[in-house]
Image (tube, coloured by chain):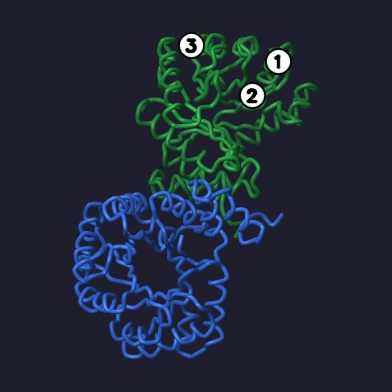
Chain colours: A green, B blue
Amino acid sequence: MLIIGEKINGTRKEVGAAVVDRNAAFIQELARDQVEAGAGVLDMNAGTNPSREPDDLVWLVRTVQDAVDVQLCLDSANPAALGSALAEVKQTPMINSISGEPPRLTGILPLVAQHGCSVIALALDDKGIPKGVQERMAVVRRLFEETRKAGVTDDRVYVDPLVMALATDNQVCNVALDTMRAVRNEFPEAHLTAGLSNVSFGLPSRTLVNQAFLTLALAAGLDSAIVDPMDRGIREALFASELVLGRDRHCRNYTRAIRARRIGDAG
Amino acid sequence: MLIIGEKINGTRKEVGAAVVDRNAAFIQELARDQVEAGAGVLDMNAGTNPSREPDDLVWLVRTVQDAVDVQLCLDSANPAALGSALAEVKQTPMINSISGEPPRLTGILPLVAQHGCSVIALALDDKGIPKGVQERMAVVRRLFEETRKAGVTDDRVYVDPLVMALATDNQVCNVALDTMRAVRNEFPEAHLTAGLSNVSFGLPSRTLVNQAFLTLALAAGLDSAIVDPMDRGIREALFASELVLGRDRHCRNYTRAIRARRIGDAG
């Protein structure tokens, strides 16, 4: 599974301050730590207001690229910021995100197409997040109409079915999992992704809930996720689930991660 | 989910010694601890040779019933031992187990029928454990022919699809999970059970593997399991998975277990 490291996100207080203060050491440490912990892509969210976001995102991209050699995921709703950052990236990045909201489609999809990026596609539109699976799939189908029309092949699209907080509705995971299975079935070339931690918002011992959801999502076809790769519990659920699902030949990845002490008991 | 506590098993060295020495205090503590940890049924396996097993199983049953008020699961392949123990039980017990092996069917199934017991039915026969799902389902279908003919209703049958060690074959969980789904589909009144810990035999940090398998098995319809209820990791996966699967209204069981410190972070 592709891990998209979520930690360089300016809406988090410490990261936001580091962006404003141009604290390169802090950002570079977050980048290195995530890559070491297994992130294959790093999400880059400046989290600042639209007028300064282009400069901030460019600074973030340069700063992170000076520290690590990894694909980036440019996370912004601001076409100007994305455009500026796209001129700086060393590897073709992922873009986070498009959705059925018209400004995202008119402002961001052309950049995705033009630069050959992959893109996260959220199953929501200007009316919000649809409650049921069928309504979410209707949005997803419209999104694929648009990406295909723009020349973006399905294998460059990472559908995020959107997982809400279980604390407010105990069927949110079932809806997300059913949507994942439907996407897998209907758009077999496409990828699936999800922000895992929303699901446990407002609950105690959140990692337990995130782990159970990750296991079920992997079984439903999830092949990437936006997570904190330094969360040992998430890594443990990931390696153990891949093993149980028969995707780890000779248990090699699991036992290797144990030996490297990336997962497992201290003993 | 119904937890069948596995710890009173004479094939475990300490327990076997306690049976031979008639160490009631040791056995009763194991019984109380398991019930307190959430076991709804206690497995009773004397683990001794056939000639003394009837006496030993009767002693176990009396000893445990003096300490706790809970359903027992009489675990023996020996009809004489089962018959003696059946005369002692206060509640109608579960029997562990029948299978497609002729002696189990001729020796044990009549006791199940006569005493109105529920019974664990293993998906194996005298040729061993079938490798594939279809072969296992063939055994399961023959077992239901026999239980129905004996007048045992499907809702008294707990099918154990048999989970082998992942370390020897990385598809064993997929086979077990597919068998569970097939049983659920074809015998909707029947229950499913499994000994969870086999799956991780020979691997390090076994709880991680058991947890991932439990989560997937619950999604596949598992509604009971033969486990160590004192294993905190198993309890954590159980409560978190039921929550994620939408089976815990208002997150009540999960949050209650956290508050009671039965699961979750110390903090």
Q: How far, Cα to Cα, is label 1 from label 3? A: 22 Å
> Which of B144 and A48 lies nearest the eye of the viewer?
B144
Front residue of B181 and B132: B181
Nearest to N terminus: mark 2 or mark 1: 2
For badge 3, the amino acid type reads Ala
Whole-percent x and y of residue A36?
61, 37
Residue type (three-letter) at the residue carrying disc 1: Glu
Taking B265 as reference, is B153 left or right? Answer: left
Q: Residue at x 63, y 27 (%)?
A: A68
How far apart in space, not on screen, are marks 2 and 3 (Cα)?
20 Å
Q: Residue furthest right?
A: A21
Q: Is residue A101 left or right of residue B118?
A: right
Q: Is residue A170 above or below residue B50?
A: above
- Where residue B225 appears, as percent x and y from the top left, is 43, 63
- In the picture, the quarter occupied by the C terminus of chain A is bottom right
Q: Disc 1 designates what residue?
A: A53
Q: Circle 2 marks a residue in which chain?
A: A
Instruction: Give the residue pinned by disc 3.
Output: A113
Quadrant of residue A188 within the rendered picture? top left
- Could you say which is closer to the camera, residue A161 or residue B20? A161
Q: Kindly identify which residue carries mark 2.
A: A44
To which chain does the residue with label 3 belong?
A
Earlier sequence position, callout 1 versus callout 3: 1
Name the image quarter holding residue A26. top right
User: Contact, CB < 8 Å: mark 2 with mark 3?
Assistant: no
